[in-house]
Amino acid sequence: MKNHLTQAFVFLVLMITMTGCSVVGDIFEAGLWVGVIIVVLVIAIVFWVIKKLFK
């Protein structure tokens, strides 16, 4: 139970800190490929957390 709570907290923190158009603008200002890599990493982390929550 505690492990699920920790994972949910990490997921919530990630979602709160990565909101808004300013983040997206800053990422793509650094370069298209940097943005693509970050988006792929975030999606992979989200799927990993969801998989761990429902395991």
Image (cartoon, grey):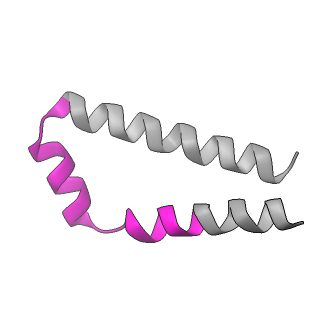
Q: Left of 16 or right of it: where is 32?
A: left
Q: Quadrant of residue 39?
A: top left
Residue 10, quarter of picture: bottom right
Does the magenta segment cover residue 27? yes
The magenta region covers: 11-32
Residue at the top extreme, as displayed? 33
- Residue 21: % across, % down: 24, 64
Q: Is residue 35 above or below residue 9?
A: above
Residue appearing at x 43%, y 34% in the figure: 40
Identify whether 3 is placed above or below 36.
Answer: below
Asked which quadrant contains residue 31, the reply is top left
Magenta stretch prevailing secondary structure? helix
| Picture coordinates of residue 6, whole percent (x, y) | 71, 64
Q: Residue at x 30, y 68 (%)?
A: 20
Q: Position of residue 32 (x, y in %)?
A: 17, 33
Was residue 10 drawn as part of the magenta stretch in this picture? no
